[in-house]
Amino acid sequence: MSGGHVEKRGPGRWRARYRGPDGRERSRTFDRRVDAERWLRAEVGSLDRGAWVDPRAGRVTVGELGTRLLTTKGDRNTRAWYSAMLRHVGARWEHVPIGSVRHVEVQAWVGDLATSHGPDTVRGAFKALHELVALAVRAQLIGHDPCAGVRLPKVERREMLALTGPQVHHLAEALEAGRPGHGWGTLVRFAAYSGCRAGEIGALRVGDLDLLRHRVRIAGARKTYGEDGPTKTGRVRWVALPRQLCDELAAHLAPRPHGPADRVWTGDQGGALSHKWFYAQRFVPVVDDLTERGVLPVVDTGSGRRHRLRFHDLRHTCVALLIAQGAQVYEVMHHLGHTSVNTTVNTYGHWFPEVQDRIRTALEETWAAAAG
């Protein structure tokens, strides 16, 4: 047979041999000649198609490939996310050879993970495993994708919550009353009236504030790995602030160090503010209390679950307040720092019909006045 041959190795023993692309000989012994020839045809065929994989390469473990995958992630925030997702992968697959991973086992793992984690986490862990598998395929460690066709849990996209002006006031006052002197109430008002992201607020320096001109420069963001970095879009923008918020910021900074490099908000012990800590230890307890008392709204999904206010909903609140005052799509886009108007429309488009209603009413009133 071209590209290899089968030889008899004794009673009932047949050995198939061929030479791989690296020049090394590969062989396998069978009890029947027909099985040896079938295996040899498959191996030589994969050589001709350029799809040959060294059988020993599949012994590389999933854990080893996970380490390699992390080295391909240059951004530290991205690397931190993949590291967290790979912990879920490693709990099941760390010591398993990549060549031993089977589709049915991946599907079962996804199902098991979904019983203890939310859809976003399950999808994130699967994404990390799938990229790891793709890395193995490109490196010719395996010749197939065991992740192809795996069914993933659906993500229930929760409806956005938006507070009214009085609700923002109640939330800010409750946060300030619980821990006076830290400026948590001012932080909530800043989030609701500026629309800035949590990371952007965490990275804010005193030098970014231009209180005389009632604006703030958003030039960076606090990342999950604990350092400041660029904004989500990589761009710097100026955000307009209401005069009352500027007065409150000035009062917040007056009794504390407020050189240009000092942070506007810090943790209880000083240093950079951790949003994860603030959210869990300060924000959520107050939100839960106000929600139970009926001060803050909830979203009823209709499936027995009720979603409460998240910190990111304060960004949505800013959009709702702007639209209520007649702001148009492009104005909202620039205020939030979106790079495309499509992002603004896709996220908040269903809120803009209220603006159209006001426009139509104004035109109707103009018509009526002219006709009268």
Image: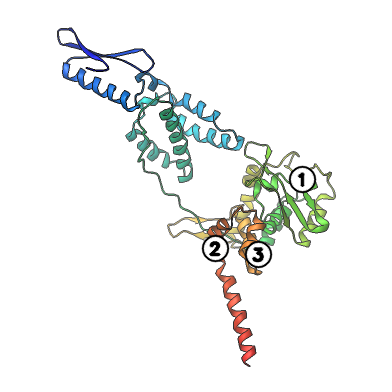
Residues marked 1 and 3 touching at CB (< 8 Å): no
Residue furthest bottom as drawn? 372
Amino acid type at circle 2 is Gly
In terms of image quadrants, where is residue 263? top right
Q: Residue furthest top?
A: 10
Q: Verify CB contact (< 8 Å) between mark 3 and mark 2.
A: no
Q: Secondary structure at mark 2?
A: helix
Q: Secondary structure at mark 1?
A: loop
Name the amino acid, label 3.
Leu
What crowding class fits label 3: few (fewer than 14 Cα within 10 Å), some (14-19), or many (20 or more)? some
Task: List the residue tagged with mark 2.
Answer: 349
- Per the model, the C-alpha gap separating discs 3 and 2 is 13 Å
Q: Judge whether residue 177 can be spotted in this image.
A: no
Q: Quadrant of residue 247?
A: bottom right
Mark 3 or mark 2, earlier in chain? 3
Q: Is residue 141 left or right of residue 38?
A: right
Q: Position of residue 277 (x, y in %)?
A: 64, 42
Q: How many marks?
A: 3
Kindly identify which residue carries mark 1: 205
Give the Cα separation between the discs numbered 2 and 1. Answer: 33 Å
Disc 1 marks a residue whose amino acid type is Arg
Mark 1 vs 3, N-terminal side: 1
Q: Quadrant of the N terminus?
A: top left
Q: Which residue is mark 3?
A: 322
Earlier residue among tags 2 and 1: 1
Which residue, as the protein is rendered here, is positioned at the far left? Answer: 11
- Quadrant containing the C terminus is bottom right
Task: Identify which residue is drawn at 78% across, 51% down.
Answer: 209
